[in-house]
């Protein structure tokens, strides 16, 4: 039995399927940003705290007024274990839509000094445009 015609048909079907046009995403299909973007460039430890430097970017289409930071510090290796959660609110930071501003975040946690410590930063707007935003999950006043 000759399988060559079947292979040719399968190849042509694959080629035609790959050449079909796709519909452009409408606004409902586009994922909206959920948080501010942190671009870390370095850390400095002064013995009492660790200062993270870099930039913070506003991906939203409205200005951000104030930023809430939640830094989760965890042990790396084996299984992840949360060592500490540090939070800070900076009401004075304003970031225009699509813009970045310098970041210097002083994280006061001794757990940052552990060799196996890793961290994750979540940055949320206090106000987006004129709307007050809810605090991040786990935020303690």
Image (cartoon, rainbow, N blue to C red):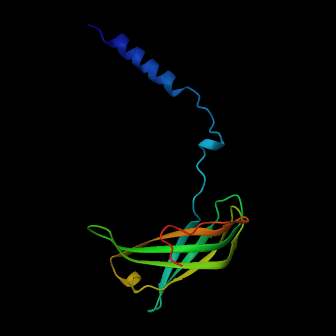
- How many marks the image carries: the answer is 0
Query: Which residue is at the front of the view, 98 or 31?
Result: 31
Q: Provide residue 95's location: percent of width, then percent of height.
A: 69, 69
Taking the spot 60% from the left edge, 52% from the top edge, the residue there is 32
Percent x, y for residue 39? 55, 68
Of residues 45 and 26, which is closer to you in this image? 26
Quadrant containing the N terminus in the rendered view: top left
Quick one: 53 or 32, which is closer to the camera? Answer: 32
The residue most toward the top is 1
Residue at the image position 41 percent from the left and 14 percent from the top: 9
Q: Quadrant of the C terminus?
A: bottom right
In the image, taking residue 63 as reference, residue 87 lies left or right, namely: left
Q: Which residue is at a point 72% across and 64% down the rendered structure image?
A: 129
Q: Describe residue 104's horizontal placement relative to residue 63 as left or right.
A: left
The picture quadrant where one finds residue 2 is top left
The image quarter containing residue 21 is top right
Residue at the front extreme of this rendering:
141
At which x and y percent is residue 124?
58, 68
Residue 113: give x, y in percent of width and height. 39, 84
Position above or below: 7 against 51 = above
From the viewer's perspective, is residue 124 above or below residue 29?
below
Could you tell me which residue is drawn at 48 percent across and 86 percent down?
108
Q: Is residue 133 left or right of residue 11?
A: right
């Amino acid at each position: 039995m000759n399988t060559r015609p079947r292979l040719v048909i399968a190849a042509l079907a694959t080629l035609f399927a790959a050449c079909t046009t796709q519909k452009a995403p409408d606004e409902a299909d586009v994922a909206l940003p959920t948080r501010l973007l942190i671009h870390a460039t370095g850390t400095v430890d002064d013995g009492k705290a660790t200062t993270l430097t870099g930039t913070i970017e506003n991906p939203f289409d409205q200005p951000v007024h104030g930023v809430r930071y939640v830094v989760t510090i965890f042990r790396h290796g084996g299984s992840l274990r949360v060592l500490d959660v540090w939070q800070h609110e900076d009401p004075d930071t304003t970031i225009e839509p699509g813009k970045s501003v310098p970041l210097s975040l002083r994280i006061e946690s001794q757990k940052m000094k552990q060799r196996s410590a890793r961290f994750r930063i979540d940055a949320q707007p206090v106000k987006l445009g004129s709307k007050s935003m809810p605090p991040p999950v786990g935020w303690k006043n």
